[in-house]
Image (cartoon, rainbow, N blue to C red):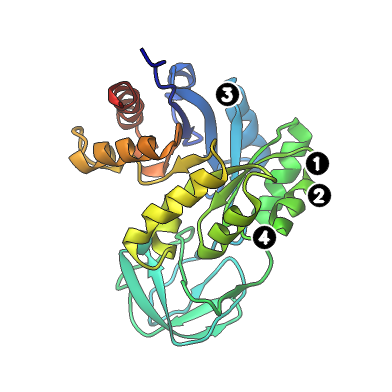
């Protein structure tokens, strides 16, 4: 008889949630993840102090070169300001809402996008933006918020870092300079990130297939299959994240496709899953996701 499958989960923790102690005790939970986009009274120090009290490895998710909206905008009447200055050939497509909304960028001025039209709604701070084009150049890597969190981690003796949009050896090296001895989880989310993973594997830290943005960045949706295979080949202990049991955030009964999706990821060799923001915001949805992950793991052959 084969040994039982060991499946683990890292859960995204809303800083003010009242159910964190219950999550910390769950048998599948192997760590907490703090999404540093979330606001917290008192800043990084207070956020980290509160979350490190639950005796779980606390992974601080730095945004790196990921493009995010700064401030509110109502295009096309106002420009969309980004977290980084960029250069890209225009006109070019940009994607909002995890790829569900596509708009045309007519011009770029430093950190501002001038859009032809839409999205026809208020664009809020913190939203991610994907520009999938080989000419894209992003100025700098770590944000000021990233640096503030690294300084706070150093003061508190914390070492677990998730780094978004890893594409070069210098990305992890910058984190190590600011937080010596950091244990870095490298989030692979772009075509350049996939090239990094294929070339360098887990030489700088454990890889993560961060499917939220990677799904948009692979250009054709079906290409996510090869990307996931390449990441687990490059690092047999790679973690897979995002778009996992998301249906539970909106309905108590999981979508059939969600169950098949996790079974497919298990068949590729993934054993540690990171649950994203949407499913982790409410107690019932995150606990159901954890219990369902355990059940699918037991059924896996």
Name the disc covering residue 170, or none: none
Name the disc covering residue 177, or none: 2
* Between discs 3 and 4, the one toward the N terminus: 3
Say which quarter of the image contains residue 47.
top right
* Between discs 2 and 3, the one toward the N terminus: 3
**Could you tell me which quadrant the C terminus lies in?**
top left
Spatial distance from mark 1 to mark 4, Cα to Cα? 18 Å
Front position among marks 3 and 4: 4
* Between discs 4 and 2, the one toward the N terminus: 4
Q: Are marks 3 and 4 in contact (CB under 8 Å)?
A: no
* Between discs 1 and 4, the one toward the N terminus: 4
Of the pair 240 and 5, the residue shown nearer to us: 5
Q: Are marks 1 and 2 in contact (CB under 8 Å)?
A: yes
How many numbered circles does the render carry?
A: 4
Spatial distance from mark 1 to mark 2, Cα to Cα? 6 Å
Rendering coords of residue 115 (x, y %): 41, 82
Rendering coords of residue 216 (x, y %): 40, 62
What residue is rendered at 41% in x and 43% in y?
Answer: 277
Other residues around mark 4 within 10 Å, as few (<14) / some (14–19) / many (≥20): some
Rendering coords of residue 267 (x, y %): 36, 36
In this rendering, does residue 97 appear at all? no
Image position of 3 with respect to 37: above or below:
above
Name the disc covering residue 168, or none: 4
Query: Label 1: which residue?
Result: 180
Query: Label 3: which residue?
Result: 56
């Amino acid at each position: 008889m084969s040994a039982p499958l060991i499946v683990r989960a890292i859960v995204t923790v809303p800083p003010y949630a009242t159910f964190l102690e219950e999550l910390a005790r769950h048998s599948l939970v192997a760590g907490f993840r703090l999404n540093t986009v979330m606001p917290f009274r008192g800043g990084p120090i207070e956020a980290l102090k509160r979350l490190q009290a639950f005796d779980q490895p606390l992974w601080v998710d730095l945004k790196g070169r990921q493009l995010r909206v700064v401030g509110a905008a109502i295009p096309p009447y106002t420009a969309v300001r980004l977290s980084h200055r960029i250069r890209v050939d225009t006109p070019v497509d940009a994607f909002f809402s995890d790829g569900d909304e596509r708009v045309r960028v007519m011009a770029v001025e430093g950190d501002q996008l001038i859009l032809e039209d839409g999205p026809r709604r208020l664009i809020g701070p913190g939203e991610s933006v994907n520009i999938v084009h080989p000419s894209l150049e992003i100025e700098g890597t770590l944000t000021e918020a990233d640096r503030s969190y690294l300084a706070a981690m150093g003061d508190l003796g914390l070492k677990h870092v998730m780094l978004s949009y890893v594409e070069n050896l210098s990305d992890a090296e910058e984190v190590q300079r600011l937080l010596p001895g950091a244990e870095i989880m490298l989030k692979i989310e772009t075509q350049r990130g996939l090239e990094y993973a294929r070339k360098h594997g887990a030489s700088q830290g454990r890889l993560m297939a961060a499917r939220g943005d990677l799904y948009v960045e692979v250009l054709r949706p079906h290409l996510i299959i090869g990307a996931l295979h390449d990441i687990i080949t490059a690092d047999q202990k790679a973690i897979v994240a995002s778009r996992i049991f998301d249906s539970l955030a909106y309905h108590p009964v999981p979508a059939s496709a969600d169950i098949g999706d996790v079974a497919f990821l298990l068949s590729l060799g993934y054993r540690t899953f990171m649950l994203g923001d949407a499913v982790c915001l409410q107690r019932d949805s995150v606990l159901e996701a954890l219990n369902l992950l355990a059940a699918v793991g037991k059924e896996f052959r």
